Image (cartoon, rainbow, N blue to C red):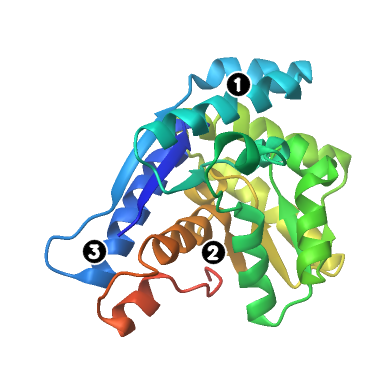
Amino acid sequence: MKTLGLIGGMSWESTAEYYALINRGVNAALGKNHSAKIVMESFDFQRIEELQYAGDWVALEREIIEAGKRLKAAGADLVVLCTNTMHKVVGNFEAQAGLPLIHIADAVGQAVKGSGLRTVGLLGTIFTMEQDFYKNVLVRNFGLTVLTPDKPDRDTVNTIIYQELVKGHVRESSRTVYLEIMDRLVADGAEGIILGCTEIGLLVKSARVPLFDSTALHAAEAVSRALSAFPGPSDARSDAVSRKPVQ
């Protein structure tokens, strides 16, 4: 079994979900009392948020690369960056940190393409929805058409993430707002919705179209990669790394 290096704390609420999903996936695949081999670097999210809103992506790239180097020194074989937004700064990660990165947009794109859908809505932070670093992977690598909400809805989605979900506040009123925004994306042609922020899956569990939970899909891909050369029940492993959309 390979050792996974998790870069987390962005936020710790979703990082805890990663930890649980990965360990459950390994146990489902291998049985007995197996669990994942994990080392972790966890950030103080306040500093990350301040640098994001200041637009200091150079500093953020440096932080992520240095975290990767520390994970390599700790024995990690692969890196899971437990956030969508910070994939904006991973272009030089593998070369600089010396470890392969399991890219979250690749895990999501594979799932969407495998489902047969071609047009999807994308919810996430304002950075993920408005910048091209994430959408370009989905378009270029998987041939998808990606829709995002209009500006007022993007602001609402982002506010709920940073003011509620990263603090673990899951409110029925916010769930209703998100579902309304999703319905507007469906009216615009979305066949499914990507939950492109690792906290959104804590709030929204189902909708009237397929949901692609980036956290669950990324964690499943991490399990698959960690166990890629490890003997175990193939049917259990298949279940553990299913890329079916969350319904």
Q: Residue 143 at x, y = what percent? A: 82, 71
Query: Rounded to the nearest whole Å, what is the CA distance between mark 1 and mark 3?
Result: 32 Å
Which percent across, then down, holds residue 107? 59, 62
Label 2 sits on what residue type?
Ser
The amino acid beneath tag 1 is: Ile
- For this rendering, which residue is in front, 233 or 76? 76
Specify the label residue 48 is tagged with: 1
Q: Earlier in the sequence, mark 1 or mark 2?
A: 1
Distance from the alpha carbon under mark 1 to that under mark 2: 30 Å
Instruction: Determine whether, in the image, residue 79 is placed left or right of residue 20.
Output: right
Going by the image, does 70 lie left or right of 194? left
154 above or below 20? above
Crowding near pointer 1: few (<14 within 10 Å), some, many (20+)? many
Q: Nearer the viewer, mark 3 or mark 2?
A: 3
Image point (40%, 69%), residue name: 228
Quarter of the image for residue 51 reads top right
Looking at the image, residue 208 sits to the left or right of residue 154; the answer is: left
The residues bearing labels 3 and 2 have C-alpha atoms spaced at a distance of 25 Å
**Residue identifier under label 2:** 206
Residue 23 x/y as whole percent: 29, 54
Does residue 86 appear anywhere in the picture?
yes
Numbered-mark total: 3
Of label 1 and label 3, which has the lower sequence position?
3
Looking at this view, is 100 or 155 the one in front?
A: 100
Is label 2 in a helix, a strand or a loop?
A: loop
Dot in front, 1 or 2? 1
N-terminal label among 3 and 2: 3
Residues 119 and 55: in front is 55
Q: Which residue is mark 3?
A: 27
Residue at x 60% of width, y 53% of height: 104
Residue visible at 48% across and 39% down in the picture = 170
